[in-house]
Image (tube, grey):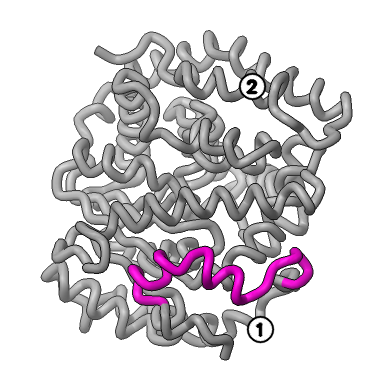
Amino acid sequence: CDPIFPLWPPRSALKARLAALFFASNHGMALRPRVYMITRYSMQLFLQVLYSALFTMDDILFAGYRACELSNAVFIVGGFRTGSTTLHRVLALDEERYVSPRFLELAVPFLTVHYCLDFVEWFDSKVGTGMTAALERKLQAAAGPDVMARHPMALTVAEECDVLLATCHWCGYYAITMAPTSAATWEAFGGIEHFSQHEKDHIVSLYTRAMQKVLYRRGKGRSLLSKSHLIDCMPLWRKAFKGAKFVGIVRHPRDFVTSWVALAQPAAEMLTGHRMPLHAAVPAHLAFWDTYLAKERVFFLKEEGGAAADPARVYLRFKPFIKSQLVTMKELYAGWDWDFEGTPFQTRLEAAQAKTKAYKSTHSYTNPTLEDLGLNDQLICERYDTYISAMGLEEFSTKK
């Protein structure tokens, strides 16, 4: 039975939101961002009537979308700033095989709305107006230069599925930027494994219907390619979607801890008007990574110390992937008994290699150093030693 209010946040997320607003330590959050957050959350709850009406319109006008199957989907999952976006956009080059959701399909999961936007895009192309381009500029301006430099966004580019659960169900680790308080608060939102079974089913239902809409409108017989940081959802997707494959990407913690703090801080300020003071933010982020990396290790390894012999659950190491994407993709597809050589995917990937080789030089930002955050290399290596060893990252433990 489908929920009456499919976008209504689960009870655990509602409780976490109230706790974040009124009971958690907000490290000096001023009154204005508190009022802004309260107003924003209240408005979203009041809009549930409109959301339900739009969902109902989709079910009446485009009932066929419910017949779309999410079998043989590929789910990319990884921690923030580990290269998951790059991996996603590399695999998305296999346009004959995959379709990935875009930002607005996740933030506004209504076919009625998207067919209207399709008309606007068609009208732009015929008349020469720039309504779609103006909408994209507003999206990018809202994200802000710091966020755009580290995570470029566009209306027609594949986007991560965290957007869906963060905007609709208030779940997932986007809470780090939407409720800048503490690691315990972030886990209350992101720790979906601790939600009740009813809440998990509610999340799976929304996700399934949103992805079915993507396949209905743009799939053309292709499979879903999804990317997110929703490590808690992977066991749920594994049970829900037949033939699903999961690709992780792992990186030495030294290389993503600083980068993530540098992105999360301005993103939180953009979304809430508040950023945590660094002396509070750094310990909170380290505690978050303690939990996240442990979950990642459990999902991709059957037991401590040994990689799972399961071709449907594989993980890639960031540096070898970035250095040799063609080789990595060839080996990945070979493990799945899929063709790679001689395919349009190989041709597109070869053409994209020049851009990949300029991976670092194209960055328009500078991350803080570990020392800037009051950390050091030894502390990081010791704190995450179990993860580094289990995921085979020892060779990257020495700076090069």
Question: Looking at numbered disc 2 in the image, what kind of residue is underneath it?
Answer: Ala
Is 378 in front, or is 53?
Answer: 378
Q: Is residue 33 left or right of residue 329?
A: right
Is 397 in front, or is 120?
Answer: 397
**Residue 361's disc number:** 1
Q: Is residue 128 left or right of residue 388?
A: right
Q: Position of residue 250 (x, y in %)?
A: 42, 67
Q: Is residue 154 left or right of residue 396?
A: right
> Which is more foreground, mark 2 or mark 1?
2
Q: Is residue 323 left or right of residue 333?
A: right
Q: From which residue to which does the magenta span run?
A: 371-393
- Image position of 109 with respect to 163: above or below: above
- Image position of 195 with respect to 183: above or below: above
User: Could one spot residue 133 in this view of the protein?
Assistant: no
Is 211 in front, or is 396?
Answer: 396
Q: Are marks 2 and 1 in contact (CB under 8 Å)?
A: no
Picture quadrant of residue 245: bottom left
Question: Looking at numbered disc 1 in the image, what kind of residue is underneath it?
Answer: Ser
* Residue identified by numbered label 2: 19
- Dot 1: element: loop
Q: Position of residue 65 (x, y in %)?
A: 28, 30
Q: Position of residue 302 (x, y in %)?
A: 20, 57
- Dot 2: element: helix
* Mark 2 Cα shell of 10 Å, populated few (<14), some (14-19), many (≥20): some
